[in-house]
Amino acid sequence: VMGPTGTGKSSLISRIIGKSTGVGHGLESETENIWSHRFKTTNPAWSGDLVLIDTPGFNDTRRTATEVLKQVSTFLEQLEKNDFKLAGVLYLHRITDNRVATTVEQNLRLFKRMCGERAMPQVVVATTMWDLLPDRAMGKPREEELIKYYWKDVPKPRTARVEPTPESSWQLLTDVVLAGELKRSWLIQDEMVGEGKILPETSVGRELHVQLKELLRKQNDRLLQLQDLPPDDPERQSAIEEYKSLRAEIKAIIADMEDLRIPLKRKLLRLVRLFAKSVSPISAYVANSSFDFFTNKCPCTTLRTMLSPLCLNTNPVYRLIGRAYVLLKGAVYNGFRLFHYTRNKV
């Protein structure tokens, strides 16, 4: 069960399992950690035990999005390593929000990057808190807007409404389990377990880094505006407080971005792998060719043809690889000439 803080994740689980799991009544998160709830059911739709997993939202009030992402990604990584597959995913959204806030939109983008297109059919997106609307008709256009603009990657039949009753919650759970009949690994699981990537190298890690970078830019712009206020401005005192708060937020954002920075040794390793991948067809060609390094009678035209896409590539990494190989080839050629010349002299 996923979604922003305050969408009713813990309340939904409490109605299903029949006991309290710690329900928040404000905007503060009651789910600081990932909790799993195992229980037996006699529902004819499935057999055996069910495990509901309660996750914190990326807009958690007590921790940064980076900390939450680390925790969720580690949990998903361990599931994959132990060959446990998620039967389905339930993503909650408050229908009482008359507009999609920036943080909610960012949450959804992170979720999509974490899940990936292949596992998206397992997702059921549900709106909550319909009972809090003054008029239920108000929720209809909001729901349509969400489906059209923000949930367009999710198959339309996989959307639902959640009523504050056990019956509605159980029906929703049935929809989720049936949606996940074909259990697929998430994109982040494939990246971290299958490809050996670390969190900053994954799609969701890069997405969060982009969001933090954009937030940092906005905060810095606002900071400059506050600095330009004249001394006699009536809002200066409140601006000073906002200035101090922004400085603290910017410091926290920079720390988060540092956590998501790819270590230098990983960058070098990736460069070596790209180099090896790019050089392998050339090396194979050289190994199967007759070279005379002393007279330089070698099929240079063919080699130059193979190297030119690398040397002229718009990607600076590939361009660097191409140039490095040209230099390496020259060094090897001169070394062989010197060896051949010295041997003949002796």
Image (tube, rainbow, N blue to C red):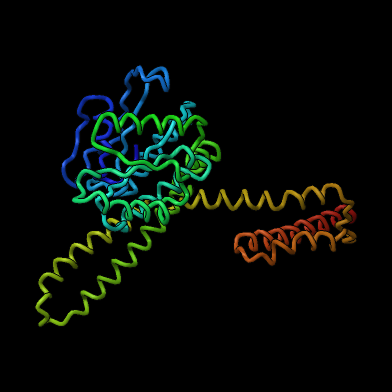
> Toward which corner of the image does residue 52 lie, by quadrant?
top left
> Toward which corner of the image does residue 194 lie, by quadrant?
top right
Is residue 258 visible to us here? no
Q: Position of residue 324 (x, y in %)?
A: 67, 60
In this picture, residue 288 sits left or right of residue 69: right
Q: Position of residue 339 (x, y in %)?
A: 82, 54
In this picture, residue 32 sits left or right of residue 73: left
Q: Position of residue 306 (x, y in %)?
A: 78, 59
Q: In the rendered view, tell whether residue 14 sits above or below residue 333.
A: above
Q: Residue at x 19, y 62 (%)?
A: 245
Q: Residue at x 60, y 60 (%)?
A: 317
Q: Residue at x 47, y 29 (%)?
A: 85
Q: Position of residue 262 (x, y in %)?
A: 46, 51
Q: In the rendered view, tell whether residue 62 sits above or below residue 13.
A: below
Front residue of 170/88: it is 170
In this picture, residue 86 sits left or right of residue 224: right
In this picture, residue 189 sits left or right of residue 44: right
Front residue of 217/87: it is 87
Task: Indicate the quadrant containing the N terminus: top left, top right, bottom left or bottom right.
Answer: top left
Is residue 186 visible to us here? yes
